[in-house]
Image (cartoon, rainbow, N blue to C red):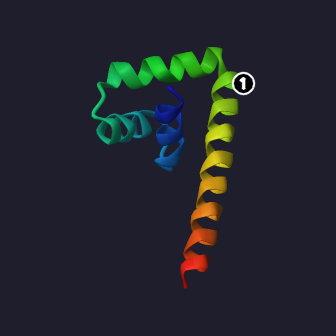
Amino acid sequence: MWEVIEAFRGTGLTGEKAVEATARWGALTLAEVRAAIRYYGDFRDEIDDRILVNRVEAERLREAWERAQAALA
């Protein structure tokens, strides 16, 4: 669910154009994207927290990879 919302936000679009772009990105139906958006409307804090956790973890892993690359140089 959080992936759909992250993709939706990342389109840089609004409204139906964002829904359509998100559907194309995820090979989803428009109904599936709209369901994710409705869920987000009801559980915004839960989804936002999940997105933040994933961003922090991705950053931690990127930094670890960069340290490993530096150690190999």
The residue sitting at 43% across, 21% down in the picture is 34
Residue, x 64% and y 31% (percent of image)? 50
x and y percentages locating residue 18 in the rendered image: 43, 39
* Residue, far bottom: 73
Image point 36% across, 41% down: which residue?
21
Seen in the picture, residue 63 relative to 45 is either above or below; the reply is: below
The disc labelled 1 sits on which kind of residue? Answer: Asp
Could you say which quadrant of the image residue 17 lies in?
Answer: top left
* Residue bearing mark 1: 45
Q: Callout 1: 10 Å neighbours few (<14), some, many (20+)?
A: few
User: Is residue 13 shown above or below 65?
Assistant: above
The image shows residue 68 at horizontal and vertical percentages of 58, 70
- Of helix, strand and loop, which one carries label 1? helix
Work out whether residue 31 or residue 46 is closer to the camera in this orientation and state it. 46
Relative to 8, 45 lies left or right: right
Instruction: Name the foreground residue: 40 vs 51.
Output: 51
Q: Is residue 19 above or below residue 1?
A: below
* Percent coordinates x, y for residue 9 in the rendering: 54, 42
User: Does residue 45 appear to the left or right of 27 in the view shown?
Assistant: right
